[in-house]
Amino acid sequence: MSMKVGGGEDEPITDINVTPLVDVSLVLVIIFMVTTPFMSQSKLNVTLPKAMTDESKNEDHVTVTIDKDAKISVNQTTIKNDDELLKYVTTDLMKTDQKVVIIKADETAKEGAVSDAMDVIKKAKPKKIYFATQSKKGGVK
């Protein structure tokens, strides 16, 4: 490997400068890392019940959210009836490896609405169904 020193020939520089490409790529990665947690939040606002358990599962899952007015959403999609709930849960479960459903029900939601939703979810045949709770210290489990 040799390097030309001095004035000699005037040849155009043919090497690609990758520094700006790396800079832009790193900025995009940082933007995606910061905005991703906001994308996974449900459109429905729920207050989770408090529990003493300290178990936290980090599995690939389907999230069913039930608010205080018995409105239901699957991941980010608002559901209108039980047939839609079954369709979306079944479709989303096929995309996951763990086949886990997490139900995030508002603490003031009627038990009947939660029970009815759970019956429909069971028809989709998930391996496990979890209820999301909020720890006494304030974190979501």
Image (cartoon, rainbow, N blue to C red):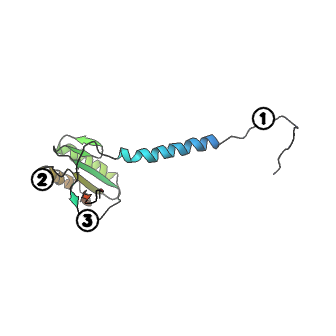
* Residue 4 vs residue 45, the one in the foreground: 45
* Residue 129 vs residue 109, the one in the foreground: 109
| Other residues around mark 2 within 10 Å, as few (<14) / some (14–19) / many (≥20) | few
| Other residues around mark 3 within 10 Å, as few (<14) / some (14–19) / many (≥20) | few
Q: Residue at x 45, y 48 (%)?
A: 33
Amino acid at dot 3 = Thr
Q: Are marks 1 and 3 in contact (CB under 8 Å)?
A: no
Give the Cα separation between the discs numbered 2 and 1. 75 Å
Q: Which residue is mark 2?
A: 111
Task: Quadrant for residue 25, please give it.
Answer: top right
Of mark 2 and mark 1, the one earlier in the sequence is 1
Q: In this rendering, is residue 52 above or below 25?
A: below
Q: Which residue is mark 3?
A: 53
Amino acid at dot 2 = Glu
State the SS at label 1: loop
| Other residues around mark 1 within 10 Å, as few (<14) / some (14–19) / many (≥20) | few
Give the Cα separation between the discs numbered 3 and 2. 21 Å
Q: Residue at x 28, y 59 (%)?
A: 137
Amino acid at dot 1 = Pro
Q: Nearer the viewer, mark 3 or mark 2?
A: 3
Residue 110: give x, y in percent of width and height. Answer: 12, 50
Give the Cα separation between the discs numbered 1 and 3. 67 Å
* Residue 133 vs residue 135, the one in the foreground: 135
Q: Residue at x 24, y 48 (%)?
A: 65
State the SS at label 3: loop
Q: Which residue is mark 1?
A: 12
State the SS at label 2: helix
